[in-house]
Image (cartoon, rainbow, N blue to C red):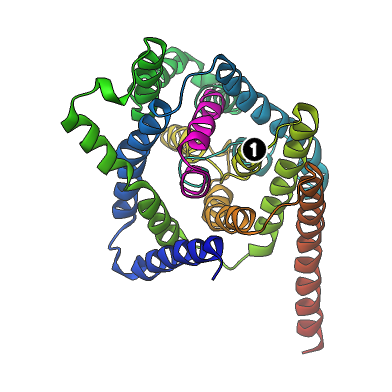
């Protein structure tokens, strides 16, 4: 059997095992605990190892800027396309939710395991550096945007802005991944690598890094809980987002002329699942509005939950397909082809949904 196919089947099997464990979960807090282990222990250890095993190159410093630029372009495309596609105005809770979630990326829970498994530690280090720009976007810029919209809906809330910004700064400093990036980059600038660490630290970090892929795949399987209502609509939105990611990938590869593992890193990174951080921002604001007795909510958390639930497995399927299918030598044209396919499917699914609804209505009238 093809080695790539063997690896893909093995990864899917871990997702299925996670799905089978859903009935063992007594509460969502248990799932949150697993996510905490991934983001606070396994992922930081993996990124730390990846960064220190790759020789430092000054050109790597441009990758965070590329990551941030990717987020901004994706946000602009969502802002232009989705109001026309969905019929929701830009100042509605649903549209604000889409603008918060769809441009965000969660490579830690979706992209990094596959980059590490299929492309190796050098590629993982490149993806981790690119994610620095994405973190600036999801943790800082989207938070500021969310608060701006909240102030529009609730002008009286402006008095708490300094307190909230202080809480955001504390989050940025205390997040394990950010702490690891600072330490690892400091060691790289000083010319250090893993050999400068004591043997017991090298062994401990190495063992923790091995946890990431199985834990993430189990988490994906355990987190899949999709409401049947409007499933095709949400799936269509995510496929359009995927098409935008492929289109941006094609443009980047066309301009830069990159080849080798950089091609796959770009393709996989842009297909990362939706980030949980914007959802955390929206949940915090929703709680503030609830306590204040505010009727008009800034965001639609039901829409956010559905999108998050579908995004992880969909992203997994897309990235496994990218890693398993041999790509032709002439890129970026396959990226543009994948973009067209995703657009056709994404724009077509809502039409199918409307057709199904119409047929049910006609049957009800006849009955």
Q: Position of residue 26 (x, y in %)?
A: 27, 63
Q: Position of residue 168 (x, y in %)?
A: 42, 21
Q: Residue furthest left?
A: 200
Closer to the camera in the image, 270 or 332: 332
Q: Is residue 129 above or below residue 210?
A: above
Asked if one can make out residue 171 in the rendered structure from this viewpoint, the answer is: no
Q: Is residue 135 magenta?
A: yes
Q: Position of residue 221 (x, y in %)?
A: 43, 62
Closer to the camera in the image, 165 or 293: 165
Give the overall secondary structure of the magenta segment.
helix
Going by the image, does 48 lie left or right of 354? left
Q: Which range of residues does the magenta coloring cover?
A: 112-138
Asked if one can make out residue 249 in the rendered structure from this viewpoint, the answer is: yes
Going by the image, does 163 lie left or right of 92? left
Q: Residue at x 51, y 16 (%)?
A: 158
Closer to the camera in the image, 298 or 118: 118
Q: Is residue 132 magenta?
A: yes
Q: Is residue 21 above or below residue 212?
A: below
Q: Quadrant of the N terminus?
A: bottom right
Q: Image quarter for residue 153?
A: top right
Q: Quadrant of the C terminus?
A: bottom right
* Number of marks in the rendered image: 1
Q: Secondary structure at mark 1?
A: helix
Going by the image, does 137 lie left or right of 83? left
Q: Please name the residue that numbered disc 1 is placed on.
A: 266
Going by the image, does 62 lie left or right of 169? right
Q: Residue furthest top?
A: 190
Q: Residues within 10 Å of mark 1 (few under 14, many from 20)?
A: many
Q: Residue at x 56, y 17 (%)?
A: 61
């Amino acid at each position: 059997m093809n080695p790539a196919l063997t690896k893909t089947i093995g990864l899917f099997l871990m997702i299925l095992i996670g799905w089978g464990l859903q009935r063992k979960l007594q509460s969502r807090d248990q799932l949150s605990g697993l996510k905490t282990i991934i983001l606070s222990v396994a992922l930081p250890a993996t990124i730390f190892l990846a960064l220190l095993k790759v020789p430092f190159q000054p050109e790597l410093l441009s990758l965070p800027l590329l990551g941030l630029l990717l987020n901004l372009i994706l946000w602009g495309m969502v802002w232009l396309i989705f109001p026309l596609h969905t019929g929701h105005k830009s100042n509605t809770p649903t549209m604000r939710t889409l603008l918060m979630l769809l441009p965000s990326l969660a490579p830690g829970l979706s992209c990094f395991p596959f980059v590490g498994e299929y492309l190796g530690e050098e590629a993982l280090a490149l993806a981790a550096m690119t994610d620095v720009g994405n973190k600036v976007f999801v943790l800082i810029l989207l938070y500021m945007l969310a608060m701006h919209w909240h102030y529009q809906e609730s002008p009286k809330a402006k008095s708490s802005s300094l307190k909230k910004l202080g809480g955001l700064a504390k989050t940025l400093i205390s997040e394990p991944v950010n702490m690891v990036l600072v330490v690892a980059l400091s060691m790289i600038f000083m010319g250090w690598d893993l050999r400068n660490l004591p043997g017991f630290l090298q062994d401990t970090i190495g063992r923790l890094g091995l946890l990431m892929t199985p834990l993430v795949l189990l988490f994906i399987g355990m987190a899949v809980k999709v409401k049947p209502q409007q499933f095709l609509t949400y799936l269509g939105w995510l496929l359009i987002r995927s098409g935008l990611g492929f289109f941006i990938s094609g443009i980047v590869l066309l301009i830069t002329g990159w080849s080798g593992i950089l091609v796959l890193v770009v393709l996989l990174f842009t297909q990362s699942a939706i980030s949980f951080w914007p959802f955390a921002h929206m949940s915090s604001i929703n709680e503030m509005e609830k306590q204040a007795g505010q009727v008009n909510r800034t965001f639609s958390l039901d829409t956010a939950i559905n999108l998050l639930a579908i995004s992880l497995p969909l992203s997994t399927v897309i990235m496994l397909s990218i890693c398993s299918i041999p790509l032709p030598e002439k890129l970026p044209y396959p990226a543009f082809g994948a973009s067209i396919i995703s657009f056709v499917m994404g724009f077509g699914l809502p039409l199918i949904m409307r057709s199904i609804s119409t047929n049910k209505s006609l049957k009800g009238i006849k009955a």
